[in-house]
Amino acid sequence: MAKSDKEEMTFLQHLEELRWHLVRSFASVFVVAIVAFMFKNIVFDTIIFGPSSPEFFTNRMLTLLADRLSLPALAINQEVIKFQNILMAGQFTMHLKVSFIAGLVVAFPYIFWEFWRFIKPALYQEEVNHSRGAIFFASILFSVGILFAYYIICPLSVHFLATYHVSDKVENILNLGSYISTVTSIVMAGGILFELPILIYFLAKVGLVTSDTLKKYRRHSIVVSLLLAAIITPPDMISQVLVCVPLIFLYEIGIVIAKRIERKKIKADVAVY
């Protein structure tokens, strides 16, 4: 089955169409960023500073669990943390940065949809049919990754880093920019890493990876998962395990996805002959 007329477009026409997809994507980020900028109390007090607050959902649940199991160590982030800003334009700059990140996170499904609209005309109709739901599942996985990182990894990371001492003579005075960079990087990394099954899906569709290849490098994937967990989390074993386990699970899902794609290709080849 022939592809669409898009493959007959010139290189400059492709660039022009790509430019408009990028413009619309950036516009969606810009609009959401403006809204986030206007509602700074919700964005900062409720969302950004949430993991450091004793009233945060995860902190409250762990405190209840600590009381029932008589394990005080589970009660984390029980003291209100004060943050320090030492730059003249530090808070305003951070306000802009966080608003832009909020725009990226909220507008992600639309950005992915624009990307899909750009590559869709270059695909065969059968490939388009098999790829239906890609936007939905990519958005779901990204959202789950964001929520997992925000509600599980962030509170543990904040507690570990804010209470860690090399000596009782050293007092932790947390820098605003350092805290926000830590929280946002963990959250964004969580959303991106949870897209692993989607990445494997497209690589398997174009034949760059197979289920056998993924199984062959399963041990290597565990090492890579540990390295990624060590990069995006503080150096404590609990946070690293909490990141590593979902990555290994997502890799195994990727193997199943690649296997299903191979079966469909075999059936399609048999139908042709």
Image (spheres, rainbow, N blue to C red):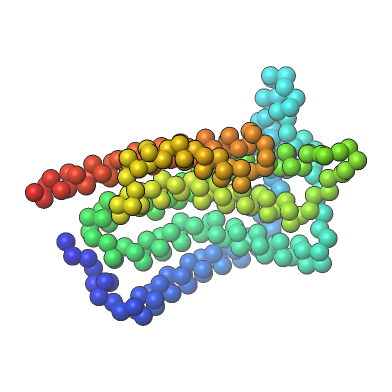
Residue beneath the point at 83% across and 45% down: 172
Residue beneath the point at 72% across and 51% down: 179
View extreme (left): residue = 273
Residue beneath the point at 19% across and 44% down: 266
Question: In this picture, is 245 found above or below 18?
Answer: above
Q: Quadrant of the N terminus?
A: bottom left
Residue 182's x, y, as percent? 68, 50
As drawn, is 69 to the left or to the right of 188? right
Q: Is residue 139 visible?
A: yes
**Image label count:** 0
Residue 238's x, y, as percent? 63, 33
| Residue in front for this viewpoint, 18 or 261 | 261
Q: Is residue 150 visible?
A: no
Where is residue 119, by image quadrant? bottom left
| Residue in front for this viewpoint, 93 or 210 | 210
Residue 262's x, y, as percent? 26, 44
Residue beneath the point at 71% across and 42% down: 158
View extreme (top): residue = 69
Question: In this picture, is 152 found above or below 20?
Answer: above
Question: In this picture, is 244 found above or below 18?
Answer: above
Residue 157's x, y, as percent? 68, 41
